[in-house]
Amino acid sequence: MPAYFIAFRDKMHDAARYGAYAQKAMPTIAARPGAKVIVGNGALTKVEGELPDGVVIIEFPDVAAAKAWYESDAYQAVVGERLAVTEGRAVIVEGL
């Protein structure tokens, strides 16, 4: 069953540093079989609640694969760069 890593970005403090983080993070996703970016901070349309600044959705084959990517040495080496320049939250959700 597919799973999705979903990050909601509420505030961006440094767009250049976030861009540098994204360049480093992409190869960590590409290295994971079956992983693909579904949404990458595209245009948002508000329908309910507070509108985040950005949303990223990455599809994985299952929850274990999503957790393995997030906890991998490769991603952990760069995730701090995102956390240093943004405010938000992230979840892994099981799909249908």
Image: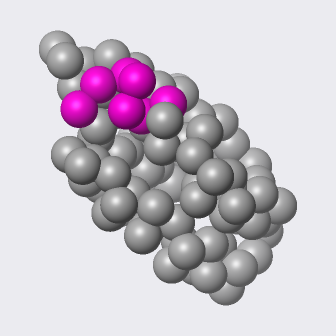
Look at the picture and state if 92 lies above or below 86.
above
Identify which residue is drawn at 49% across, 35% down: 68
Horizontal and vertical percent position of residue 3? 31, 26
Identify which residue is drawn at 75% across, 65% down: 81
User: Which of the image's four quarters has the N terminus?
Assistant: top left
Residue nearer the viewer, 96 or 35: 35
Horizontal and vertical percent position of residue 55? 46, 49
Q: Residue furthest right?
A: 84
User: Which of the image's four quarters has the C terminus?
Assistant: top left
Identify which residue is drawn at 59% across, 59% down: 74
Identify which residue is drawn at 35% across, 60% down: 31
Look at the picture and state if 76 lies above or below 64.
below
Residue nearer the viewer, 53 or 4: 4
In reply to whether residue 51 is colored magenta, the answer given is no
Q: Main secondary structure of the magenta part?
A: helix
Determine if residue 16 is in view: yes
| 36 on left or right of 88 | left
Determine if residue 53 is in view: no
| 24 on left or right of 76 | left
Residue nearer the viewer, 12 or 29: 29
**Snapshot quadrant of residue 63:** top left
**Snapshot quadrant of residue 11:** bottom right
**Snapshot quadrant of residue 24:** bottom right
Horizontal and vertical percent position of residue 36? 25, 53
Q: Which residues are magenta?
A: 61-67
Look at the picture and state if 14 lies above or below 70.
below
